[in-house]
Image (cartoon, rainbow, N blue to C red):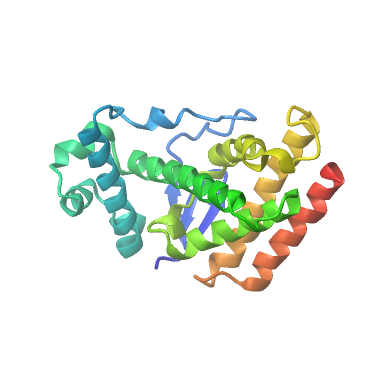
Amino acid sequence: MQAPLTGTASGVSTGTRRIPNANPNANANLNPNPNADSRLRCVPIQRRSTERLRRILDACARELDEGGYERLSTRAVALRAGVPIGSVYRFFADKRAMTDALAHRNLDEFLDRAAARLAAPGAGSDWRSAVEVLVDEYAAMKRTAAGFALVDFGVPGETNYDLADRLPELIGDRLTVDPADPRLRLALVVTVEAADATLQLAFRDDPSGDPLLIAATKQLIRAYLGSVLD
């Protein structure tokens, strides 16, 4: 497994080397929230194209785990995915765009996995139990999901706002305030940014995640969100 990612507003760090932000002005707006399809040259419509895109992103994730971003190449991804190099370029302009797409797929998968756990029996019915699930699911993906240890959700300035905006629907009836309350939106943005920083620290030197730092992340979130939700 590669050295864990360290997120910053200007890019994604792979240990000591930084994956550059494809858009240096991405953080100029308070809520960039880019369209997930904007990083694709061609949006797949047919099942065959969708499957080919999935194979390309799967191959990208495995290449990142084995060689890191610096050694990642579109040719290596095409070879591993078993597709012509032209198929990669049909979807992506370069490896940065491909990595961005993988990061956003990671975010979608994280939300799907968290939603399934929150809907399971015994998951609890309050927002504090949702915090437990979200942090635990993130840690699980850090440990096991291909490519996630290196890029997770991508550039924080883009995806952290996206995640914060999608949390009210995910948490649902566990929220104790109106989802439209601007105080909630601010609290979720701060929560996601703070959790991102502490969880990156938890995985920086330990690929399995420092359990004390993971527990501290949960404590931090509960203490802060309690000022809005209690």
Pick whichever, 214 or 26, lies toward us. 214
| 35 sits left or right of 198 in the view | left
Total number of numbered discs in the rendering: 0
Q: Position of residue 227 (x, y in %)?
A: 86, 46
Classify residue 127 as left or right of residue 42. right
Name the residue at 68% across, 38% down: 172
Q: Residue furthest front?
A: 121
Front residue of 108/214: it is 108
Q: Where 62 sits versus 25, above or below?
A: below
The x, y position of residue 109, in whole percent, is 46, 47
Residue 183: image x %, image y %?
Answer: 80, 34
Above/below status of 209 relative to 79: below
Residue at 47% from the left image edge and 65% from the top image edge: 143
Q: Residue at x 75, y 40 (%)?
A: 175
Is residue 54 visible in the rendered image? The answer is yes
**Camera-side residue: 164 or 100?**
164
Confirm whether residue 153 shows in the render.
Answer: no
Instruction: Say whether residue 44 is left or right of residue 173.
Output: left
Relative height, residue 225 to residue 218 (above, below):
above
- Single out the residue that lies furthest toward the left: 84
Is 155 placed above or below 41 here?
below
Question: Which residue does the image show at 71% across and 60% down from the upper left?
Answer: 218
Query: Within the image, what quadrant is residue 222 found in?
Result: bottom right
Quadrant (top left, top right, bottom left, bottom right) of the N terminus: bottom left
- Give x and y (percent) for residue 37: 39, 29
**Residue 211: quadrant of the picture:** bottom right
